[in-house]
Image (cartoon, rainbow, N blue to C red):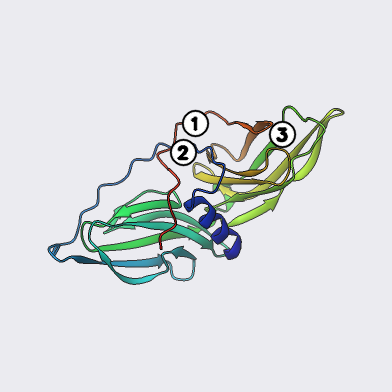
Amino acid sequence: MFRALALLAVLVLAGLLVVSVYASDEPLSWVPWFEGTDEEYVQLKIEVVPRGAGNTYLKPGTYEIKRGETVVLQVVDVSSGYEFSHWEVNFVDYGSAPFKTLTLEGDAEVKAVFTRAASGEEAGYLVVDIVFYDKPLEPPVGSVTLWELGVSMPLTPVQVTPNQWHGQAIFKGVRVGKTYTVVVNLENGARGTYVNFWTVYNRASYIQWGLISCRKKMPKAPRSIFEPFEWPG
């Protein structure tokens, strides 16, 4: 799973994906920078909480970085039984998107916070349904990843009517009320990798994603503030 998420991370950050992105309109948080900000270089400390619950890029550790530079904060692995919750920067909530950037104006302590996966009444399931509107007899082939869970599922062909096939992936154990990053990798039809953000509003949630040739028809959602950027050297 680490390799799959890491590869998607590289593709997203390098801007190599055919991406249509929508997001929960999550504002960037204000960061209270630590004192001692006159030096040319600042200290960046990255930590995973709890330890062993997942992994990040940059990897957990301490770095010296030139002041004013922008760094990538990226979830690249999620351990079994956990899900990614949010980032903290200098003890302030920095949002729940698994891809973030941070411009360093001072020393920073960054925490990638993970929680135990949902269970009981707080857990539900999400059906991701893909269809080619102009090729109804061709079932979409590929996979779907819920980034915060670190789980990928293959698209299963489903015959909806005698003349229409869909591809579906079903995820169990999603948290009701949480927004997930849905990454679809298509190997036929409108080939490419597509990203969407979807909030699970009840225990049985369903998202249909329709494609017309190489044009994407996305479920309505606010426009994203996320833009592809270059993988740092």
Relative image position of residue 232 (x, y in whole percent): 41, 60
Question: Relative to 233, is 174 on the left or the right?
Answer: right
Q: Which residue is mark 1?
A: 221
Q: Residue at x 57, y 64 (%)?
A: 2
Q: Is residue 185 left or right of residue 98?
A: right
Q: Which corner quadrant of the image does residue 224 belong to?
A: top left
Question: Could you classify mark 3 by the number of other residues whose Cα lies within 10 Å: few (under 14), some (14-19), or many (20 or more)?
Answer: many
Q: Is residue 20 left or right of residue 162?
A: left
Q: Helix, strand or loop at disc 3?
A: strand
What is the C-alpha distance between the residues marked 3 and 1? 19 Å
Count neighbours of disc 2 (C-alpha within 10 A) and say few if under 14, some if 14 to 19, many if 20 or more: many
Residue position marked by numbered label 2 in the rendering: 23
Residue at the spot x=57%, y=37% of the render? 202
What is the x, y in percent for residue 115?
47, 58
Q: Which residue is mark 3?
A: 131
Task: State which tag comes first along the sequence, 2 or 1.
Answer: 2
Q: Give the residue furthest to the right.
A: 162
Q: Viewer-proximal residue, 178 or 18?
A: 18
